[in-house]
Amino acid sequence: MLDLRRRQFITLLGGAAAVWPLAARAQQAERVRRIAFLHSFAEYDPEVLARVVAFRQGLEALGWIENRNVQLEHRYSAGDVDRIQTYTTEVVRSAPDVIVCSSMPIVAALKQTGSASSRRRPPSMPAARMTSAHFCPRSA
């Protein structure tokens, strides 16, 4: 009788050891995507705040929830050309999944930074330009 319990225990222990990695894999969450948002205005500018709210609402409508499956990173340049260049360089080096630009000067700086540092980023990293009316994907 004792031998039978021992065998059952060993069988149970072996089965648990075999299933444990499968259960651990099933519990792993999907990868959190990173979106870098480069703004040409100051952080508390009403237009910037409206764009950020609209962008978040659009993401949520598509199933992307901030701090759950997507992380948003914002850089506010307040129209300062030096800051724009610094922030675009930082963002390209950090290699987010998507870069969103709020103005043409940022798009130009991003293209300049991207061509100078293409070795440091994935070649197909998407960038996007956002206007007050629409959101259009664009390759960097």
Image (cartoon, rainbow, N blue to C red):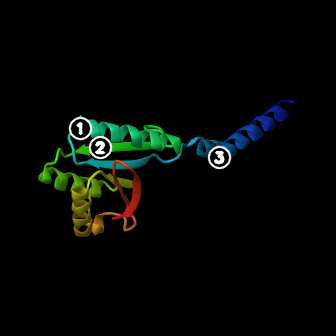
User: Is 31 rendered above or below residue 49?
Assistant: below
Q: Amino acid at mark 1?
A: Glu
Residue on which disc 1 sits: 43
Q: Position of residue 37 (x, y in %)?
A: 32, 48
Q: Report the mark closest to the observer, 2 or 3.
A: 2
Residue on which disc 2 sits: 74
Q: Position of residue 124 (x, y in %)?
A: 40, 66
In-front residue for pair 74/39:
39
Residue on which disc 3 sits: 22
Residue in the image at 40% along x and 43% along y: 55
From where the camera sits, is residue 69 visible? no
Q: Position of residue 41 (x, y in %)?
A: 21, 44
Whichever of labels 3 and 1 marks the residue nearer the N terminus, that label is: 3
Residue in the image at 13% along x and 49% along y: 80
Residue 130: assigned label: none
Which corner quadrant of the image does residue 108 belong to? bottom left
Mark 1 Cα-neighbour bin, 10 Å: few <14, some 14–19, many ≥20: some
In-front residue for pair 44/8:
44
CA separation in Å, label 2 and label 1: 9 Å
Q: Amino acid at mark 2?
A: His
Q: Position of residue 7 (x, y in %)?
A: 80, 38
User: Is 114 rendered above or below residue 18?
Assistant: below
Screen quadrant of the N terminus? top right
Helix, strand or loop at label 1? It is loop
CA separation in Å, label 3 and label 1: 45 Å
- Residue extending furthest top? 1
CA separation in Å, label 2 and label 3: 37 Å
Helix, strand or loop at label 3? It is helix
